[in-house]
Image (tube, rainbow, N blue to C red):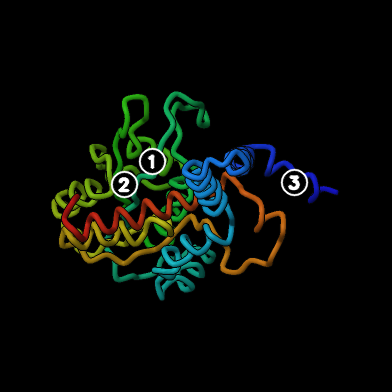
Amino acid sequence: MIYVVKFFCHWLFPPGCLVLLLLLTACWLARKGRTRAWLPVLAAGLLLWGLSLRPVAGLLVRPLEASFAEPAQAQALKAALASGQRLEVPWDVIVVLGAGAVQGVPDFGSADQTSGIMAKSLLLAARLHRATGLPVAVAGGRVFGDSACEADIAVRQLAELGVPRDKLLAEGQSRTTVENARNMKPVLERHGFRHPLLIAAALHAPRAELAFRREGMACTVWPASFRFPARTAFSAVQDLTPQAACLEDSASALKEYLGAFAIRAGLQ
């Protein structure tokens, strides 16, 4: 019964209800003989339906998320973290990219929060710091007037997670991935760091690495915050009905492909 309810709920709420509205409108226009009108409406409905389906979102997201695997030192670092020891690694700094922040909301007695995506990256950075002792540099500023400075929030949260303040660096002016890389370069150079470990959301990692490489920084990438499991089993509820989360995944993946193209083409 629960899956029947979920099936109909996906059609009751956006984008499902919008897909139905477009498809029904296309049928009505076709019955009225408006041949020039019903085909574009039908195409819009099918496109929205397709982008909202989990299989389509997976086709767009998985190639990006599979671009980078955990570094070869991952298992040894996990063992070092579990034992309380520190491991020598080929990097000299951990770099975390901003991924959104919310202003004026409670966060454990403080104001402002990072997004869930960025929070996962910060958690990984805190773990890696404990296993290596490496400093952590965070890039990300205030993107919009009513948003918060990502780097400032991240520094506070990392300090609360046990990273010493003297091991934290912040670059709080950048608003885009390109600016993250461009503004972080002089910060790292000023402190003599040449071998960064770059933590970024798995979907975003290819574009982030491309931006840093264009600035002359060869990074080892550690992907975090995956959107899709490695394998999925067919489910009519999940694979045939439109879902807002899958539409967001499709849109985010298309943004990454377009952003990477813009960097390669020198448009950013």
**Three-letter amino acid code at the position of disc 2:** Val
**Image quadrant of residue 91?**
bottom left
- Closer to the eye: label 3 or 1: 3
Rendered location of residue 258, percent (x, y) = 32, 54
Q: Amino acid at mark 3?
A: Lys
- Count every numbered label the image shows and give the total: 3
Q: Residue at x 43, y 50 (%)?
A: 252
Choose between 71 and 260: the one closer to the eye: 260
Q: Is disc 2 in contact with disc 1, using a CB cutoff of under 8 Å?
A: yes
Q: Secondary structure at mark 1?
A: helix
* Residue occupying image coordinates x 63% and y 66%: 232
Q: Considering only vertical position in the picture, is 186 above or below 59?
A: above
Marks 2 and 3 in Cβ contact (< 8 Å): no
Q: Nearer the viewer, residue 255 or 203?
A: 255
Cα distance in 3D space between marks 2 and 3: 40 Å
Quick one: label 2 or label 3, which is nearer the N terminus?
Answer: 3
Distance in Å between CA atoms under marks 2 and 1: 7 Å
**Quick one: which residue is furthest to the bottom in this view?**
72
Look at mark 1 in the image and give the residue it sits on: 154
Q: Earlier in the sequence, mark 2 or mark 1?
A: 2
Q: Residue at x 47, y 60 (%)?
A: 61
Q: Is residue 49 left or right of residue 254?
A: right
Measure the C-alpha gap from mark 3 to mark 1: 37 Å
Q: Please give the residue where the numbered disc 3 appears in the rendered image.
A: 6
Question: Which residue is the site of mark 2?
Answer: 138
